[in-house]
Image (spheres, rainbow, N blue to C red):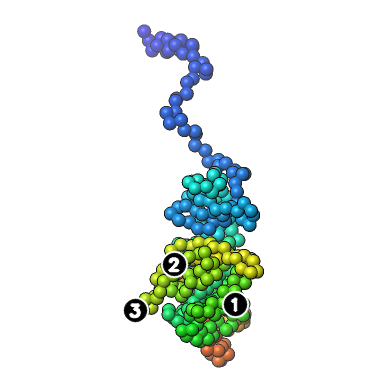
Amino acid sequence: MSWLDDADDLEDDFEDYDESSYRTRPNPKANRPRTKRRPAHEDAQIGRVLGVDRGRYSVLLDEDTPDEHTITAARARELRRSPIVTGDQARVVGDTSGEEGTLGRIVGIRERTSLLRRSADDTDQVERVIVANADQMLIVVAAADPEPRARLVDRYLVAALDAGIRPLLVVTKTDLADPAPFLSHFDGLDALRVFTSAQSEMPVDEIGAALVGHSTVFVGHSGVGKSTLVNALVPSALRATGHVNQVTGRGRHTSSSTVSLRYHGAEGTGWVIDTPGVRSFGLGHVDPANILAAFTELAEVAEDCPRGCTHLTDAPDCALIEAAARGDLTETGRARLDSLQRLLQTFADKAEQTPGR
């Protein structure tokens, strides 16, 4: 028998089969085929993220209605690489009753109006998102114990203005030291509203009035009395308070997480967003072009600078340097210029170290 005969026999064997004879392979796990299409979740509810604890998010639903309530929610798998932070407007599905033992699911985040970020240092490209959708930043410093740091406040101002957030400043512990020398550093900032507070006399009503209708993020060095101020404004907050180490002069981190708290005042309500105390505030994420905006009085002088001026100490024909040399800048102005140039020099050094530059 030739190989042609074998081929004929094989053809005869398959004549009895057609497409209806095809049998699919059983799926032992009974899984549905993978797909990149995600459900639209058109029935999702919108809620405010109040805080996060070990991967579980506290979300306020039906805000400012009789049905207002808080639920616990987890992050959907498709959002595992997307940061969800306090202040976010989250889209929530699942069990949104808020009853004990129930768990909703965050499936999306609405577009943010602002995003406050910081980095570990000025050269770190990794951003640490602090809060979303805040429109005010309340910077808390102490007149003493620990000593106020003007350059740290300058960094807060840069971060706030870069994010489009209005800055406010509170100086606590004014019964321990006169805050005037420190506050003189910011004399040229007419838009910066300043409050002062003694340990026994806090201007709670005055500060509270500035919080009504706003989402205000509280930031400050450890030990400056930020948590004490939060507790005075929101008595139900019960935020832990600490003290300053008498040897190191440093405060102890008492607030370990960022949390949103509702302020109730005589004139209305607002949101207080308390954050952990920090000893540094990196600006690695900030556009260097926005740094000068935080030094408004110097920005006016810099309008006479040549195009592309770096404002560094060796910048040719820099109007800021020439004004300082002529004595046109006050002592405060010269100190502010030094702070500005230090920040700009850090970014200039980082640019030189960046590959491809």
Circle 3 residue: 247
Mark 3 residue crowding within 10 angstroms, few (<14) / some (14–19) / many (20+): few
**Residue 32 seen by the camera:** yes
Q: Residue at x 43, y 79 (%)?
A: 146
* Residue at far bottom of view: 327
Residue 164: percent from left, percent from top: 59, 67
Residue 335 lies, with reference to residue 69, above or below; the image says below
Question: To which residue does mark 1 refer?
Answer: 193
Q: Position of residue 148 (x, y in %)?
A: 46, 80
**Of callouts 2 and 3, which one flags the residue occurring earlier in the amino acid sequence?**
2
Q: Name the kind of residue labelled 2 in the image.
A: Ala
Point 38% across, 78% down: residue? 249
**Numbered badge on residue 240:** 2
Residue 29 coordinates in the image, percent (x, y): 43, 31
Q: Amino acid at mark 1?
A: Arg
Position of residue 144 in the picture relative to residue 319 (left or right): left
Q: Quadrant of the N terminus?
A: top left
Residue 341, can we see it?
no
Mark closer to the observer (2, 3): 2
328 shown above or below 211: below
For mark 1, give the secondary structure.
Answer: strand
Q: Earlier in the sequence, mark 3 or mark 1?
A: 1
Q: Badges 3 and 1: C-beta atoms under 8 Å apart?
A: no
Instruction: For mark 2, give the secondary structure.
Output: loop
Give the mark nearest the N terminus, 2 or 1.
Answer: 1
